[in-house]
Amino acid sequence: MRYRKALLFALLLSMLCGVNGCGFKDIDKRFFVVAMGIDRGSKPSTYRVTLRLAIPTSKIESGEAKTELESIEAPTIAESVRHIKSLVDKELDFGHCRVILFGKSLMERGVDEPLKWLSRRRDIQMVAFLGMAEPNSFHVLKLHPQSERYPGNALFLSFGSEGTESSYSVTEYLFDWARRQSETGKDGYLPIVRRDIDSNSYRVDKVAFLDKKKLRLCLNSEETQLFNISAKHYDKSVIAIPFQGTRVVLALSQVKTRTNISHSDIPEITFHIRATGFMEESPPNFLGGDMQQIQKHMQTEFNNQLEDLLYKVRDAGVDPYGFGLHYLATYFGRSNEWNHWMAAYPSVKFHVQSRIVIAKPGLIR
Amino acid sequence: MARYFYYHVIYVGMINVMLFVPWTLIQHRFNGAVSGMAIAIVFGTLISYLTISFILRFPGMGFAEIIRTYFSHGVTVVILILAAFIWFMAGMLVIYSYSATIQQFFNPDMNPYLFMLLMTLAGVWGASRCSRSVQFAHEIMMLLCTPLILMILFKAIFSPWLDWDAIRVTSGYIRTAPSFVSLCAATFVFAGYNTLGIFNRLLPAGAKIKYRWIIPLFCSFFLLVSFFIPIGFHGTVGVADYLYIWSITADSMIMEYGFVYRVLYIFLLLYTALSLMFAMNTWHTAMEFLKACHPKHKPKTEQFPAPAVNWWINLAFAILTFVYAFWTNEQRNQWVNQYWLITRTFVDITTTVLLGWIVFRGSRKKKKQPPIPRDAAVTDT
Amino acid sequence: MLEQIKNEFKNASDLLMDTLDNGYLRMELAYFPSLCDERIKDGLLVPFSYRFDPDEFRRMLHSNPKYQKQDKSEEWANLLLKGNVLLEIDGQCYSFKSDRTFVTEVGTTQVEASLQGPQSAFTEDINLNISLVRIRYNKSILTVKPFDKGSFSHTSIQVLYDSELVNENVLKMLFKQMENVNIDLLQASGQLVKELTDRSHRLFPTLLQTERPDRVAVMLRRGKIVILMNGSRFAIVLPVRLFDFMHAMDDDYESYWISRFLIIMRYMAVSLTVILPAVYIAIVSYNPEIFRVQLAFTIDGSRAGVPYPSFVEVFIMLFMIEALIEASIRLPRFVGSTATTVGGLILGQAAQQAGLVSSIMIIVTSVVAISNFVVPNPNFSQSVRLMKYPFVIIAMIYGISGVAVMFFAMIVYLCSLRSFGEPYLALFTPKNQMNSGHGKD
């Protein structure tokens, strides 16, 4: 028994000696990348990679978070990341990289290669938030918001639903974007991140649409909210309709949509949407007024708004709603149906049938 | 006691992720995976029902004892060694794949053999225990892991990011002719009943296995989930790009208010336990088969401390695993996996036919009662 | 008689030997005054001297159960050492049982305290202990079997069991094992436990030691066997399962939901104390991306000044806490609190401020220490205390995945243990079985 124990112990010891080389790296020897930006380089076919690195402190106070910004240009992303490693004193760790931004100029050229790099790296989270930076990601990442409590949290919170929940900002994860980049009948979208005018916070209130290759369309913030309601069922938003000289504002509490696509030569898409909510801004004496009439008016106005948006998206040649995939799913289609859809999509017709229900008039009459 | 049996059924249903079953199916998703799965559900249920009822006719006897009563020693040894090889391969493949996964996601800088060493040592440690201890440990690990794994699965099913259109498009391909590989791969999910070949020794005489509907219900659930959820998360096209398909799928989910933010890590830790359980069970079974090759072997389900022969056989398994690891790489491993899945299906069918034949012979010679179980096979009462 | 005794006890100057003569009768008398109590006066000396009546005296010798005829001369020495008085009248030798009992009061629980349960505990006197058990287990089927172990100490041992409920196999195994006990000085129940365990190197106790008579009664009712030993405050219970060690008697006395809550909390605390230091190393040195980003930055910030790798930090703190625990057990009670204050408060605070350890590590250490004491059984608590080191070592090499593998190995180890042939860790063993335990959690 004794010599066995001794052998076992010796084995353990020899294993311990082998430890040093095997990825043992203390947390204080690591530099956490909290956000990453990929831009087009100054020369053709180069990339400019910007990393925002966290400098942790034991004190946690608003505005006290310290970060470091490193940026370098190289022919590929992998090379520039390696090059940045030579600029910093600790090992880069992408494990907490929650935000990845693409510069607008890069998006106009195409983002195939960056996507490949991102999917291949094991340490890039598939649930990282993606966004398009305007004018470029270096400019956006340079911003140091006042409210930041620990490094990079202002950006995380603007995207996710943990912090602010704004109906103007859409959320896109890496895995979803990767799927949309290859899926038949579904195209990608990215939120647009800008600096606020007074340069103390980020501004995420627009959305950009891409086809499989590059950027095709950017929506304004009103349309972005409409997209958020109709495509993402985002229910913490408002519908605002002009009515008898004032604006009626309905705060939504529940959104349901359903799409029917007809199986004709030129498919017709009927988009059903049912929105329930309560009044936030209404004409005085709302209950005394004709509620039905207001509802009806809102429905027609909303139909028009949404139809305009859908046609705009269609004309840009993108399909972020996934109508094509839904068409295939409805009719269990294969490549024939897919070819038919591709040919027909530029001329499909949209019908929006909305049902707006004012559940509560708010707290006052 | 039948609950021990269902633990095996359920965890084999869940381990398919580590044996490239979803990967194989997804590669064939447009040419015959869906129809293959449909057939596999019927076929797997049928073959498991048949085998269970055959084996239950020999109370307290393992597969080795059953065939020994009807075949000569030489034939028995050949059959047992073949069976042991198939079982051992299962554990080896899972250990290799899991070590590779862990190396990818947890310790990318680590020497790949170092983590495999730990996994094989844990496998050897677990498998060399006596059958009864294996069963107890199995139950505890199952009860610890299954709720969390089911939680992850249900989280995936109810995730708003799951694209049901993509799932519907893929399921539309049920009209294609089934592909053979995907049929074999899908049948594996139902293979949990096979462990009865050893653990029947522990079932008390006269034990009935009730609630057999659990097999088709749970196994079909696991089969469908492990195929369709990745498609729902990564699209009909994109899904084929990923090698570690389920790890990536788990990474596509977050727990906003959880202690651990990324589901991936919970998933990997749970599958550590599941893979080790699988290795423990398969190697234990293979070991028992090899031990039964000895003509005077008496099966014992309760041995404390574990005899030295257990250690040696399992150490041999561990060394073989390392030999395999030196030889193989990603492509070879997938190739071996596919052929293992196919061979396993045939072995399953052969086993069922063999047992059916023995039962048939036994019922014809009714005067000769099947031998009573040896007293050494103490049942778990 | 006296001659023979004198030969055997040559140097025992405390042995009192005398020949008394009251005019009618001569009596040879030998005893150890230090081992015998005052009963000798009323029981022997008074009837023999000034209240002497030859008939009555003879009747007393034959009828009083304290007097026994002793014909075998080789047992005399032993009887004397056990506190008997030997006397010889008319060539016939008698013994008079007059052993001194030091303990006459029931003890109070010291290591297995209970909030509202009985506070009485076993004492170091075996007769009192048996009476404590008999009071609680008031049935005729309670069997008591005496043994005498220890070639120099001659410690008396009693094996108690319910003859209807007991598992015969276990009993047979125990008696076989009892024969193998080979020990010189048997002074504590722990020694007996070691001798009865078939393999000496065990990480977890497979025999339960308890000082609570109520626990012993509950265990007897479950068909378990209890060993009482003279000179030890602890009874040994066998066979036991892991759940018995994690069971506090209060769980039986509290209301259902509260006891469930306490049991679950206890198991969580044990897993915490075992894996937390290992998880700290794994998180800090291998996979800081596992937990939330806030936590990573907090740990990073607090570790900024620590000069050496995480495992050294963990070993420093664990060593400090182990030393502190050990010191507070050994120190006299009134100094003990000083040690805790100095060690816990001042040293911890100073170590953190000096930048030797991170503040997160201080929290980890205190959680580990506190959780460890949640375990109701001191033996098991020690095992748990030891178990965290394998985890720490494996975490040093493999990170968090190594911890998961180690956890699996530990479960397998526990499941493979046997306590007198009965499984040590197994869930849902059938209730109708004699030796099934209680816990299912």
Image (cartoon, coloured by chain):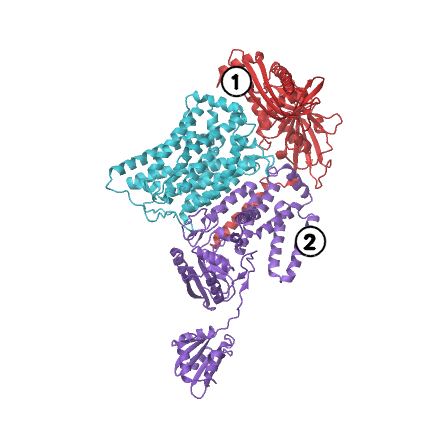
User: Would residue B149 appear left or right of A156 to someone viewing this image?
Assistant: left
Q: Colour of chain A?
A: red
Q: Colour of chain C?
A: purple
Mark 1 vs 2: CB contact within 8 A: no
Task: Determine whether, in the image, residue A289 is placed left or right of residue C212.
Answer: right
Give the camera-side residue of B119 and B132.
Answer: B132
Q: Which chain is cyan?
A: B
| Amino acid at circle 2 | Ile
Relative to B222, is C222 above or below? below
How far apart are labels 1 and 2 at the CA level?
A: 71 Å
Instruction: Indicate the position of residue C440 as horizontal and vertical percent values.
Output: 48, 47
Which numbered disc covers residue C346?
2
Does residue A286 appear left or right of residue C151 in this picture? right
Q: Give the letter of the chain under mark 2.
A: C
Q: Quick one: quadrant of the N terminus of chain B?
A: top left
Element on which disc 2 rests: helix
Image quadrant of residue B74?
A: top left
Residue B187, percent across and down? Answer: 41, 31
Where residue B55 appears, x then y in whole percent?
A: 34, 39
* Amino acid on which the number 1 mark rests in the picture: Tyr
Q: Which residue is mark 1?
A: A327
Q: Residues within 10 Å of mark 2 (few under 14, many from 20)?
A: few
Percent x, y of residue C72 = 38, 75
Q: Are discs 1 and 2 located on one and the same chain?
A: no
